[in-house]
Image (cartoon, helix red, strand yellow):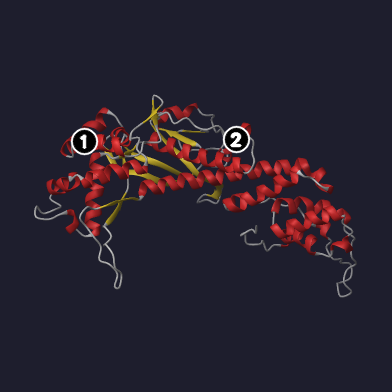
């Protein structure tokens, strides 16, 4: 396998590779170490190169300075290469996986000076594992957010013109929309009641429960049916898609458009432009509250991320007992996330942490953490978040992303509290 990483260009970054590329015999390095160093040069593992560089340098014979060098100067020998911190956070999952495989192999089968490097390699492997978990978590949460924001359905009776020269049945028109925010409170029920009555919402619930996929979220140990999930605000993106497609297929969305005056009585939804058809579908979804509440979104995101982390680490050979525990799918409210360990300092934040706000009435999930500078140039922690935003009478925003900065490296200054999930 080869790394896709762009080689670093600084002299410090090149130092380990320069040790590898010098004539090995001239440097007097034992054969076993020689093989290890050569492997690092070919694979490009930053951590092992960095750690081995200083160790291997003790075997290197210093060379005199070139004749043309200014008096009093000498060529920098490889043993003066300074180990530096590795920016794992900037690497892709694929690169982190490669780094892990090599480090883990060196720990399992140490040869030569690697035996003395075992403690340092273990520390490096732990840092690498944390970075891998964080990167996977960020990707999975962002993926779920995108799925909720770009749900696609087909408009019945429509077709798109075929490109010139293409034969076959025309493709149906496809429109895209985002899920609503919906929380199952008395106020929210009252807010959507008239729209749901007009749509014969209960019939759609039964149809999707019978034929659609269940929700990720459970109640009493049993997963919500796809229709019931929409009824109470615990939908997955696929639940929202199936529910809306059923409403299109049975005429509920066309009836809604006629009532709203956005469709003439003599027309079908298929007669609308793509943009107008998408607008009708989006309005129906928001008015009927077909979507997910804040805790439903965060729980799904956390489950999706945790499952992928466990899958990845298991594939890398991490024993089951050392894997992070699988998360319960049982539904929970926003305040329940306060039961997780408190994150006391901004510098301790990690992707996947829960941010509980408004005295436990709202929750977001952290998708990325990085050091940054505020407007005054002071160092701060900047975080990206994902959430399903709204309240009992405001469904339009739904799943969205955001970015905030802490007051400093030691003070959050953001309100609420952060917790491990």
- In the rendered image, residue 190, in percent from the top left (x then y), is placed at 21, 31
Residue at image position (73%, 59%) is 41
| Front residue (pair 255, 120) | 255
Q: Nearer the viewer, mark 1 or mark 2?
A: 1
**Quadrant occupied by the N terminus:** bottom right
- In the rendered image, residue 150, in percent from the top left (x then y), is placed at 35, 51
Q: Is residue 332 left or right of residue 264?
A: right
Q: Is residue 380 left or right of residue 175?
A: right
Residue density around tag 2, few if under 14, some if 14–19, many if 20 or more, within 10 Å: some
- Mark number for residue 203? 1
Residue at image position (46%, 36%) is 355
- In the rendered image, residue 230, in percent from the top left (x then y), is placed at 30, 36
- Mark number for residue 323? 2
- In the rendered image, residue 284, in percent from the top left (x then y), is placed at 22, 45
State the SS at label 1.
Answer: helix
| Front residue (pair 132, 267) | 267
In this view of the protein, can residue 384 be seen by the observer?
no
Residue at image position (74%, 51%) is 48
Label 1 close to label 2 by CB (< 8 Å): no
> Which of the two discs, 1 and 2, labels the residue nearer the N terminus?
1
In this view of the protein, can residue 253 be seen by the observer?
yes
Residue 14 position by quadrant: bottom right
Residue density around tag 1, few if under 14, some if 14–19, many if 20 or more, within 10 Å: some
């Amino acid at each position: 396998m080869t790394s896709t990483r762009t080689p670093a260009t600084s002299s410090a970054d090149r130092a380990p590779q320069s040790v590898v590329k010098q004539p090995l015999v001239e440097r007097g390095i034992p054969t076993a170490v020689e093989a290890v160093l050569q492997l690092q040069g070919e694979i490009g593992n930053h951590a092992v190169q960095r750690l081995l560089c200083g160790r291997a340098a003790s075997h290197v014979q210093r060379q005199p300075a070139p004749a043309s060098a200014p008096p009093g100067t000498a060529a920098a020998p490889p043993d003066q290469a300074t180990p530096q911190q590795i920016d794992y956070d900037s690497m892709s999952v694929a690169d982190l996986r490669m780094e892990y495989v090599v480090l883990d192999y060196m720990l399992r089968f140490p040869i030569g000076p690697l035996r003395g490097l075992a403690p340092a390699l273990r520390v490096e492997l732990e840092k690498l594992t944390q970075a891998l978990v964080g990167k996977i978590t960020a990707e999975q949460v962002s993926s779920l957010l995108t799925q909720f924001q770009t749900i696609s359905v087909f408009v019945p009776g429509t077709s798109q013109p075929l490109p010139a020269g293409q034969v076959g049945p025309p493709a149906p028109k496809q429109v895209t929309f985002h899920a609503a925010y919906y929380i199952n409170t008395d106020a929210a029920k009252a807010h959507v009641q008239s729209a749901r009555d007009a749509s014969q919402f209960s019939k759609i619930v039964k149809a999707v429960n019978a034929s659609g996929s269940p929700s990720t979220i459970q109640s009493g140990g049993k997963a919500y049916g796809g229709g019931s999930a929409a009824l109470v605000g615990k939908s997955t993106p696929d639940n929202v898609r199936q529910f809306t497609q059923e409403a299109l297929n049975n005429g509920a969305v066309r009836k809604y458009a006629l009532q709203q005056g956005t469709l003439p009585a003599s027309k079908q939804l298929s007669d609308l432009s793509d943009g107008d058809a998408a607008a009708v579908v989006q309005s129906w979804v928001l008015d009927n509250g077909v979507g997910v509440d804040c805790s439903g979104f965060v729980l799904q995101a956390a489950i999706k991320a945790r499952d992928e982390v466990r899958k990845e680490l298991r594939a890398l050979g991490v024993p089951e007992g050392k894997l992070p525990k699988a998360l319960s799918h049982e539904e929970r409210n926003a305040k329940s996330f306060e039961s997780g360990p408190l994150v006391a300092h901004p510098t301790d934040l990690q992707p996947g942490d829960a941010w509980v706000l408004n005295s436990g009435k709202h929750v977001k999930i952290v998708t990325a953490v990085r050091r940054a500078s505020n407007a005054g140039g002071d160092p701060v922690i900047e975080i990206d978040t994902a959430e399903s935003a709204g309240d009992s009478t405001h469904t339009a925003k739904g799943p969205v992303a955001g970015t905030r900065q802490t007051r400093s490296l030691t003070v959050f200054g953001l309100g609420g509290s952060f917790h491990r999930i």
